[in-house]
Image (cartoon, rainbow, N blue to C red):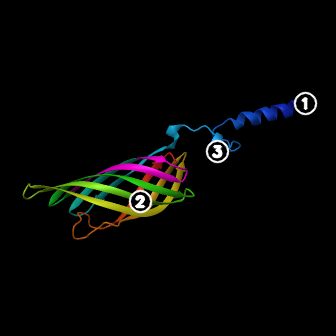
Amino acid sequence: MKKLLFLIVSIVSLACQAQDEGNILLPENQKKNNFFDNFTLGGDVGFSFGKYQWGLSLAPRIGYKITNDLEAAFSVNYTYQDTDYAKYNILGLGPSLTYYIGRYLYVNGSFQHYFISTKSKSTRITYNTEESALYLGGGYMQYLGGRSYLRLGLTYNVLYDKNKSIFSSGLFPEVGIVIGL
């Protein structure tokens, strides 16, 4: 009788666990999937400083997991730069596509369109311009816990033209956090 009761309890327990969304016993197409579970949040924060300048950069992003390894996102970034000669306000908007490799590496492409306002400190004249960038790159991801990761990477703006760009280089480091993977 004890063996039969143990067998019944074991079967019922296993059946109850099979109803859990995260249980591996159910095929992928039978797992319940909440639409909002596929959204990710993240962003970058940056600081720069030197002898004659300082700056702050904020870049929040929202993404959607198309598959477990492919994510489409949209980011807004704002940069404020103050030098001895001018103040810069830069607003960038654009989409990106990221492919995650084993949750340790990633490759991505990102398009950003920048709206740039520069105010000269000596003449007080403001100059407005726009610039586009197509960043291609990748990097390493470090697991932080839960569904959160630290992203460390490097991207290059393939549209960079040193004679026309407001940026000093086409190469950009990335440090950010992604929540929801």
| Badge 2 amino acid | Gly
Mark 2, secondary structure of its residue: strand
Q: State the residue at coordinates (8%, 59%).
A: 122
Side of 129 relative to 72 (left or right): left
Q: Position of residue 84 (x, y in %)?
A: 16, 60
- Mark-to-mark CA distance, 3 and 2: 28 Å
N-terminal-most mark, 3 or 2 = 3
Q: Which residue is mark 3?
A: 28
Q: State the residue at coordinates (42%, 49%).
A: 73
Residue 18, quarter of the rendered image: top right
Mark 1, secondary structure of its residue: helix
Q: Position of residue 118 (x, y in %)?
A: 17, 56
Side of 149 relative to 136 (left or right): right
Q: Which residue is mark 2?
A: 109
Q: Which residue is mark 1?
A: 2
Label 1 crowd bin: few (<14), some (14–19), many (20+), radius 10 Å: few
